[in-house]
Image (cartoon, helix red, strand yellow):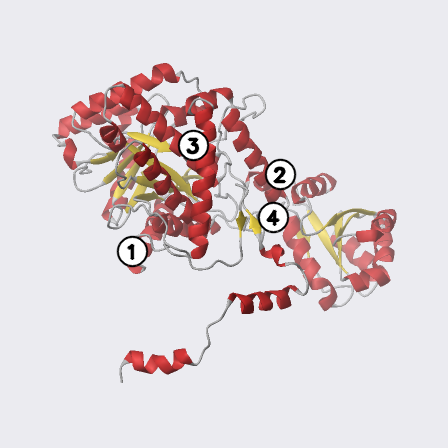
Amino acid sequence: MAASEQAAPFIDSFAPSTEEQWRKKVEAALKGAPAQKLVTKTYDGFDIQPLYARAANRPRAFRASGDWAVTARVDHPDAAAANELALTDLENGATGLQVVFAGAVGAYGFGLKDAAALAPALKDIQLDAGLRIVLDLPVHSGLHVAALLDLVAARGYDPKTLDISFGLDPIGAAAATAAPLNWAEEGPKLAELAKILIAKGFDKGLIAADGRVVHAAGGSPAQELAFALASGVAALRTLEAAGLSLDAARKLIDFRLAADADEFITLAKFRALRRLWASVERACGLEAKPVRVHGETAWRMMTRRDPWVNLLRATVAVFSAGLGGADSISVLPFTQALGLPDVFARRIARNTQLVLLEESSLGKVADPAAGSGGVEALTDSLVERGYALFQDIEKAGGLAKALESGAFQSEVAKTADERAKNVARRKEPLTGASEFPDIHEKPVTVLLPAPAAPAVNAKANPKTLSPHRVAEAFEALRDQADAASARPKIFLANLGPVAAFTARATFAKNFFEAGGVEALGNDGFADAVALVAGFKASGAKLAVLCSSDAVYAEQGIEAAKSLAAAGAHLFVAGRPGEQEAQWRDAGAQDFVFVGSDILAQLRDALKAA
């Protein structure tokens, strides 16, 4: 019997489900709460629905066929060491290199020291062997480009055989550092350099429209797309003004985006970029063609605490960027925020991509999300919002003028502030940092410790799109707790039976240990007398009362009074509701619950400890 004949009766035994049936199930599960509760709003202001119908056909813009390039970072400050690490990556599956120089947008504290380091860093690496080379250059990059041209000439390469993304991006580099940028002067210089490279035989991938700087500064997906699109259009204009045809000019531009752990938004963002740029090409009277897009796993999402979770974040990011159409991807090794990654961390970064490509065959299908109602809707929304923001930039006179005025940076800062508030209240949880922290984690090995991040005063220099990681505030509290002569501790004042206090005790443990305050657990206490005895025996200065609402109603106020009288700086797990005044009169200092400002409360706890 054929497989289809065997399957048919099984399939026919299930009636097709309908949206109405789904909504009835939702209503029952929500127990009277509105279905709107399941709708979430993005930082770009559009809604994400819980259910989407299958999408109709949409405009599509494909990447070139084949697997994306597995791109390893070349960022060791010592050129010889960088070369050794790069050769190891190439010998073990990498198909490209991201050559990062100090001061570049993607340097994150490291990078080759100067242009002279390029040749030794690429020693014994055959650039014409099908490798994808992505350069990450600092603001002033003339010497770096000259060094590459010297290397190509010395080795006798035919530029037509090389796949190099030069990454010339004076606008993005200036935005990241607040370096002065006179685009009226720098634009023609960029075009002149491009013409020199064209004369040398390089006719593609010279200029990068790089959105990573916006993402690292806390911007939204649509802001990142608008920045990249405006950067590409600025390059088109300056190249056309220098005498290049629009068809020749567009071949010189490729794109770079950050990929983070928001799976569907990242996937939709990469798809949206291709559609947006295709619309620009058509507006120029050109037939849309595949554009090169490089993805890098996001610096913003990396954590120093429990860095192993970064492996999961990077895997989701690569998956999303790859399915979204990235032509090459670079993975920040999981220890990148702690320092210069070692061979092991680099191997895991490399294999994150290789497993997805070789074992899951993710590169074999073009645009696999096409037709998915949810992904298509997200893509449509990002295209619409990204283009509207791009139009705002154009109305301001183009990207350079928008940055000069500080208007664009101001909007990015608003988004970053909103995200920071959500992180502080754990509406945007960070596993290992704000959620499920491990205060006894074992250290990991790095080749060099991360340099101290430069102090950036956003108010003093609001035009800077300075990179930051969303976990930094929690990490600062952990550092403070670790530096104390004795680790701060909080006594879990568990009142009543285990079933009554377990949920809030577990919540309180995660809450306080996110700030490095060790939670001292126990099996619970039957009354206030035993509770106070347990607190005194613990030696802690802090206590958090944990139990159910029912137990609180019977014994909570008395227990709070007893603990406060015993000298405890007392928190109560749960919302105080109408009894807040009574709780505070009894000695409760504060209340910890889902949605409270955990950062502010942890700072208070560390002061009191």
| Crowd around label 1: few <14 · some 14–19 · many ≥20 (10 Å) | few
Q: In the picture, which quadrant includes the N terminus? A: bottom left
Residue 16, position as x, y percentages in the image: 46, 73
Q: Are marks 3 and 4 in contact (CB under 8 Å)?
A: no
Q: Secondary structure at mark 4?
A: loop
Task: Name the N-terminal-most of marks 2 and 3.
Answer: 3
Residue that mark 3 sits on: 227
Mark whose residue sits in front, 2 or 3: 3
What is the three-letter code of the residue carrying label 1? Val
Q: Is residue 346 left or right of residue 502?
A: left
What is the three-letter code of the residue carrying label 3? Phe
Q: Secondary structure at mark 2?
A: helix
Mark whose residue sits in front, 2 or 1: 1
Numbered label tally: 4
Q: Residue at x 45, y 38 (%)?
A: 386
Residue that mark 2 sits on: 480
Q: Secondary structure at mark 3?
A: helix
Residue that mark 1 sits on: 365
